[in-house]
Amino acid sequence: MTDAQALQIFRDSGALLEGHFVLRSGLHSRQFFQCALALQQMPIVEQLGAALAEKLRPLGAVTVIAPAMGGLVIGQEVARQLRLRFIFAEKEEGKLVLRRGFKISSGEKLLVIEDVVTKGGRLQETVDIVRAHSGTVAGIGMVVDRSNGAVNLGVPTFSLLRMNVETFAPDQLPADLAKIPVLKPGSK
């Protein structure tokens, strides 16, 4: 799947929003990828999951882990496509943790899957969880890399759509963006 094909899926599904948005990172942007809108359609989930799974298959992982909420749907589909175990990390007191009895064995090879990445904070938290449980991160997969490859956690990383989406600190908004009402449509 090419970047153009992935971008078209977001446009066709209404999942690429235009306006003034606050991202989870606290940065502001003119574009917002609301993956949930695209991933509500199972044919799209299967298509994106298959494309990402093919990129990750050679890494030889045995488990997929995703941060909740954003990575759940695509993470589970990548695991299904690769016929691997699927677990997830979720927030507890504002921090991602393993719950629900999920375990990672020493040396277990995992793929970390996320829907959209801007600065990589939730990816880093998930990678840290894997390593804290003596697992090995075989690679990272994401649907949308808004950093255009700038996020580097020292493991093989793959995306379906890689873009450099302009982001701005709250105190450095361009005048045109500052005039538009701000929305925060993503998860917190």
Image (cartoon, rainbow, N blue to C red):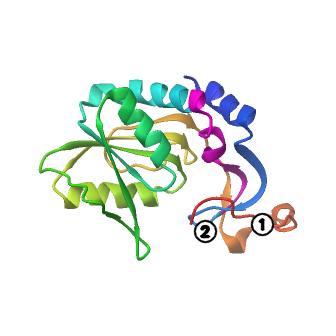
| Element carrying mark 1 | loop
Q: Which residue is mark 2?
A: 26
Between 124 and 62, the one lying in front of the other is 62
Q: Is residue 27 left or right of residue 14?
A: left
Give the spatial CA distance, label 2 vs label 1: 12 Å
Question: Which circle's residue, 2 or 1, is located before the other in the chain?
Answer: 2
Quadrant of the image occupied by residue 26 = bottom right
Most extreme residue toward the front is 100
Magenta segment, which residues? Answer: 28-44
Residue 29 sits inside the magenta stretch = yes
Instruction: Residue 72 in the image: state x and y as whole percent.
Output: 46, 48
Which residue is pictured at 48% across the width and 40% down the height? 74
Q: Is residue 101 left or right of residue 144?
A: left
Please, what is the three-letter code of the amino acid marked with disc 2?
A: Gly
- How many callouts does the rendering have? 2
Circles 2 and 1: CB atoms closer than 8 Å:
no
